[in-house]
Amino acid sequence: YKIIIGEQGHCHLQLSGCFRRGIKSPLAFLRLRAAAEKQGVPASALKGTIQNDILKEYAARGTYIFPPAPSMRLITNTFEFCSQNVPKWNTISISGYHIREAGSTAAQEIADGIAYVEAALEAGMDIDEFAGRLSFFFNAHNNLLEEVAKYRAARRLWAKIMKERFHAKKDRSMMLRFHTQTGGSTLTAQQPDNNIVRVAIQTLAAVLGHPVPAHQQPR
């Protein structure tokens, strides 16, 4: 974090950000928190997102470090700490994207979110303490209508599940906020021009599904 302290203010580096490296996310977040504290920036002013999604590591990427139980405890501890100390921080980006790239269906992309909510409730948290800072990371593949329907259905299902199953009371707790990225597994190095068309279709699907941001793969 000493490097961050040295550069902040000189290279337009702000004390906010998005950390997308799975199990290492809490450590990156703590470094940023330490840099902010060193500069006298209150934790309540920090804004950003950590990926912090360990279940997709077991299902798709394989870069986990700890067994499932202590890994989930680290994540729910992050939920609790941020709800009390860093209220503007998005504590997880639930990454259906990676699971889809590893072979899941479109419908299976949102399943992990329920597991994190259950884990936080089992740890003694109130649903409205943490649910408003959950975020999602979805994929966009080539089936235009299926992808648009997925985003819109996911938003409705999440609101219904949060309200009726987990008894959330705040509107923000029922919101499904998501980032979308076009599907890397749908592209081929041998067809760069076709990749442009694929990414265009996937981007259109994302836009029609109304993500917060959308990220396009290169040609």
Image (cartoon, rainbow, N blue to C red):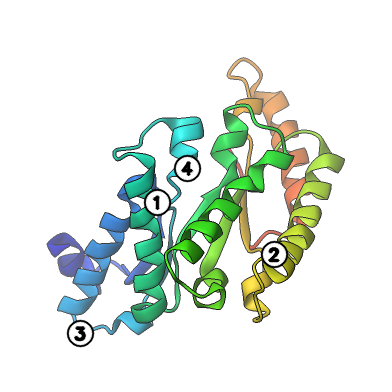
Which quadrant would residue 50 be assigned to in this image? bottom left
**Which residue appears at 62% of the width and 73% of the height?**
173
Disc number placed over residue 55 in the picture, else none: 4
**Which residue appears at 56% of the width and 77% of the height?**
128
Label 3: element kind = loop
The answer to which of marks 1 and 2 sits earlier in the sequence is: 1
| Amino acid of disc 1 | Met
* Residues under numbered marks 4 and 1 in contact, where contact means CB atoms less than 8 Å apart: no
Q: From mark 4 to mark 1, how far is it between C-alphas?
A: 8 Å
The answer to which of marks 4 and 2 sits earlier in the sequence is: 4
Tell which tag, 4 or 2, sits nearer the viewer: 2
The answer to which of marks 3 and 2 sits earlier in the sequence is: 3
Task: Give the camera-side residue of 200 and 21.
Answer: 21
Asked whether residue 219 appears in the rendered view, the answer is no
Image coords of residue 107 (percent x, y):
73, 41
**Which residue appears at 49% of the width and 40% of the height?**
56
Image coords of residue 97 (percent x, y):
59, 41
Question: Residue beneath label 3, please?
Answer: 40
The answer to which of marks 4 and 1 sits earlier in the sequence is: 4
Quick check: 118 left or right of 42?
right
Task: Give the camera-side residue of 107 and 210.
Answer: 107
Tell which tag, 4 or 3, sits nearer the viewer: 4
The answer to which of marks 4 and 3 sits earlier in the sequence is: 3
Question: Residue beneath label 1, please?
Answer: 72
Label 4: element kind = helix
| Amino acid of disc 4 | Leu
Above or below — where is 39 with respect to 3?
Answer: below
Q: From mark 4 to mark 2, how far is it between C-alphas?
A: 21 Å
Tell which tag, 3 or 1, sits nearer the viewer: 1
The answer to which of marks 3 and 1 sits earlier in the sequence is: 3
Q: From mark 3 to mark 2, how far is it between C-alphas?
A: 41 Å
Disc number placed over residue 165 in the picture, else none: 2
